[in-house]
Image: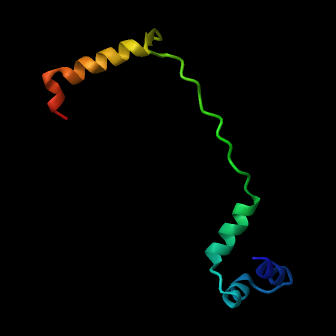
Amino acid sequence: MEIADKWIQLGYTAKTVLRIVGMSEATYYYRKYKAFRKARVYNGGRPVPGYFLTKEGHPVSDEQIKEWLSELISGEESAYG
């Protein structure tokens, strides 16, 4: 990378320099882009509130939703899709 960068900065075309160095253009530009990109930091995302809102805006607890899903799964309809 350093050798290629040096010759490209001197005015030679990237295509020619990379062919001589034996590096593909895609690899060169990917590594060049990656060097300037900051590492992403995972902050854990949005905190789980413990409830969801209905269309009308009323809160429904997670426990109630789990109960409804369990009832659906345990019924005889659970075998269909």
Front residue of 13 and 17: 17
Quarter of the image that includes the C terminus: top left
Residue 67 picture quarter: top left
* Residue furthest top in the image: 58
Q: Is residue 49 left or right of residue 30?
A: left
Front residue of 1 and 58: 1
Residue 76 picture quarter: top left
Q: Is residue 76 left or right of residue 31?
A: left
Q: Is residue 29 left or right of residue 48?
A: right
Front residue of 63 and 30: 63
What colour scheme was applied to this rendering of the protein?
A: rainbow
Instruction: From this view, report whether residue 80 is shown above or below residue 38.
Output: above
Q: Position of residue 18 (x, y in %)?
A: 69, 84
Q: Is residue 54 visible?
A: no
Instruction: From this view, report whether residue 59 is shown above or below residue 36.
Output: above
Q: Position of residue 49 (x, y in %)?
A: 54, 18
- Labels in figure, total: 0
* Residue furthest right in the image: 10
Front residue of 80 and 73: 73
Q: Position of residue 78 (x, y in %)?
A: 18, 28
Quarter of the image that includes the N terminus: bottom right
Instruction: From this view, report whether residue 65 is shown above or below residue 41.
Output: above
Q: Position of residue 68 (x, y in %)?
A: 30, 16
Q: Residue at x 70, y 50 (%)?
A: 39
Q: Is residue 66 visible?
A: yes
